[in-house]
Amino acid sequence: MSSPPLPHLALIGAGITSLTLSIRLSALAIPHTIYEQSASLTELGAGLGFGPNAVRALEYIDPRLVEIFNKTATFVGNPSHQGKELLVQEGKGVDERVWIEFLNGTKQGGGETLKPEFVITTGNGRGHAAVHRGQWLDVLGGLADKERIIFGKRVVDVVCLDGKMRIVFADGTEAGADGVVGCDGVKSKVREVLMGMLGEGRERGKCGYSGKYAYRCLVPWEKAVEAVGDDRAGVSSLWMGLNRHLLTFPVHRQSEQFLNLVAFVTDEDGQMWPQEAPASLTLPATKADALRDFEQAGFSGSVRRLLEMTKERMDKWGLYDVADRPLSKFYFGRIMVIGDAAHASTPHHGSGAGFCMEDISVLGALFEESIAHQSLTVETLEDVFAAFDCQRRERDQWLVNSSRRAADLYQWRIPDFLEPNSFEKMKADIEQRQEHCWGFNVEAAVREAKKHISERLTLHTQS
């Protein structure tokens, strides 16, 4: 008896999540087409963090990704240690890696001499590392089948017509598919369509303003070292203060070295950005804007010197997520969302990309097991999507909410952590939450996903 033909999927968006998923689908010989609204592969932002959970997920998705990652990522330590990990207590039998050193940004003193209030380590055998977003997208583009990508296709609607999913584009054309997977990021159109299908209204699918914005830029390495010293520039550092925090970490772009700088600000009036995401999440800003924001909050010393090393003009990003509008389901029928389209989050755990990789490892396992049962058909796609929702939604939505809280913790906005000498309490809280991010057991999740879909497919066959 021959196996049934595999369903054809439409992936909406050609970002990091979509291309990684495409690599996994191609390995399973699942036909698919990628629709991207831009004219080419583009990725906004600079540094992209990968924790231990992300690396384990990449290993499952495609071992080639880990091999390339280890060659291109910047691990904690001086950037000359590219591709290497720095032990916190080398030679003392302690297998821990630094994630971030937390400093009081309002203290006087140079970055080369200012001691951290506390240090968070990954503590489970693999460190946290960063890659340049554009460079990593190029890596994925080199491994994925680019012939599957159709550019210049902005989705305006998805409908189910005569048993077929129809994708409607802004240029007036349409395309058919057996199933649709929204990988279209924070401002996902597929998410809006999905919420409409669920009867909750498309407005419910729009992301909302988190109440914070950020200045982002890359500082040339020589200037960063001039500002805070080689050792401080070479380790991920978070400078805390009231209603503000600044994050710096080293990153490579091809053969060049930079310090990625992200300066986060609480919009106390909530008026800087609209509550629903505008067409662009960026606004033009200046060095003077950033300096004024941080000087008003009492930051000085190293933070001021770092900001003075930035360009005169930079971008200011509004931070949007789905914390106020969590999805009741990640799917309806044969349409689903994954990655940021499902759980758009602020970046304060450094785990958004890692959770996207977890998503792909689980969805790939569901497809793999369905094929092994010769049961991956148009009719069973809904079973796969439902199993994904069951396996991933609770954890993914935890990240959205916890990330918002983490920013308030770094910015001294949570009353329980404002008493004198509260840094140890703060450290314990962060450690617990980061371990929840990093401790994800990919192997156990894959086993559970396969067991889950096997049971669903058995029930499907019997019904």
Image (cartoon, grey):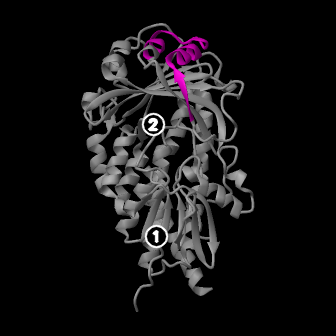
Quadrant for the C terminus in the image? bottom right
Res 52 seen here? yes
* Position above or below: 341 against 223: below
Residue 261 at x, y percent in the picture: 44, 26
* Position above or below: 446 against 410: below
Q: Kindly identify which residue carries mark 2.
A: 45
Q: Which of the 4 image quadrants contains residue 24? A: bottom left
Q: Which of the 4 image quadrants contains residue 428? A: top right
* Position above or below: 194 against 293: below
Q: What's the residue at 68%, 41% (across, down)?
A: 276
Single out the mark in the foreground, 1 or 2: 2
- Point out the tag, 1 or 2, that comes first from the N-terminus: 2
Tell me the amino acid under the disc marked 1.
Phe
Tag 2 secondary structure: loop
Callout 2 crowding tier (Cα within 10 Å): few <14, some 14–19, many ≥20:
some
Closer to the camera in the image, 255 or 250: 255
> Magenta stretch: residue 212 in it?
no
Q: What's the residue at 62%, 30% (across, down)?
A: 212
- CA distance separating discs 1 and 2: 31 Å
| Residue 201, disc | none
Tell me the amino acid under the disc marked 2.
Gly
Callout 1 crowding tier (Cα within 10 Å): few <14, some 14–19, many ≥20:
many
Res 236 seen here? no
Residue 180 at x, y percent in the picture: 54, 65
Closer to the camera in the image, 422 or 438: 438
Q: Which residue is the extreme one toward the bottom?
A: 1
Q: What's the residue at 35%, 59% (across, down)?
A: 146
Q: Kindly identify which residue carries mark 1.
A: 367
Q: Where does the magenta region start and end?
A: 282-306
Give the prevailing secondary structure in the magenta stretch.
helix
